[in-house]
Image (cartoon, rainbow, N blue to C red):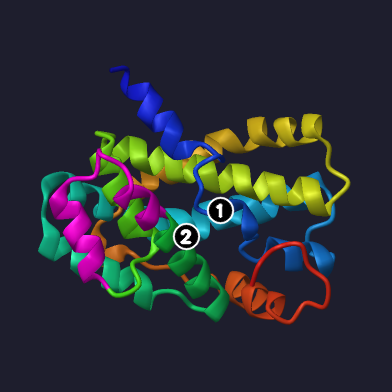
Amino acid sequence: MNTAWQLLRLASPQLPIGGYSYSQGLELAVDTGLVHDPDSAARWIEDQLLLNLARFEAPLLLAHCEAAAEGDWAELKTLAGRHRASRETRELHLESRQMGYSLQQLLNDLPEQDEAGRALLEELEQPGLAVAWALAARAWSITPQDALAAWLWGWLENQLAVLMKTLPLGQQAAQRLTSALLPRLEQAQREATEIPPARWGSAAFGLALASMAHERQYSRLFRS
């Protein structure tokens, strides 16, 4: 089988896990005027990619995928606990938990999921998205690097979808923004691959504050 099919499946917005229900603080940034046009949107997304995802989220996800590919269940459980503890706000915790639960339900209903992966998900208390994503990559024979690329692409595509719903940003403008940001996406993947575990970490205060404020935003399109 062409391995690209499974990679496209994992990266697809049709994957029924609810990713497009969340904005990760971007809706609040638009509401307050911090993000108000394509240039400010590009700065917000680039900062999230290089100052947050590349330094912590992405290398942690890659480690999940590597542990799952190797069948290192003890390491995968440790990483899953670290990921759960790193959710800085109630909103981010609920997002990871809900998407992880949805992906768990999907995997448990598919023949590709092996018994070891199924047992691990049952053993974990409220598995988050990272561990479920890693097990989906294992089930569909997707390499850890490709699984990381799919996750980064899905994150970027979701941020652009948020902008098209909250800003006067059309599809062509979104595609121009995609062209401008793809080199940063590549940079984020490369840096996430190269950073040693001892240096994992970010201090995304703006994201945490936006996420907390979004929970109390009077009118919103995306979930809290």
In the visual, does 19 lie left or right of 7?
right
Residue 89 position, x and y percent, is 53, 79
**Frontmost residue, 26 versus 13:** 13
User: Which secondary structure, mark 1?
Assistant: helix
- Where the C terminus falls, by quadrant? bottom right
The residue under the point 30% across, 53% down is 195
Q: CA distance from mark 2 to mark 1?
A: 7 Å
User: Which circle marks residue 19 in the picture?
Assistant: 1
Question: Which residue position is annotated with label 2?
Answer: 99
Q: Is residue 39 visible?
A: no
Disc 2 to disc 1: CB gap under 8 Å:
yes
Residue 136 in which image quadrant: top left
Residue 218 in which image quadrant: bottom right
The residue under the point 84% across, 56% down is 36
The residue under the point 71% across, 51% down is 162
Query: For the residue marked with disc 1, what is the amino acid?
Result: Gly
Residue 83 position, x and y percent, is 34, 69
In the visual, does 215 lie left or right of 201?
right
User: Over which residues does the magenta segment extend?
Assistant: 103-124
Furthest toward the right, the residue is 168
Q: In the picture shown, does residue 190 fall above or below 86?
A: above
User: Which secondary structure, mark 2?
Assistant: helix
In the visual, does 172 lie left or right of 184?
right
Furthest toward the top, the residue is 2
Residue 146 is covered by the magenta coloring? no
Query: For the residue marked with disc 2, what is the amino acid?
Result: Met
**Frontmost residue, 141 versus 57:** 141
**Frontmost residue, 211 versus 193:** 211
In the visual, does 99 lie left or right of 193?
right
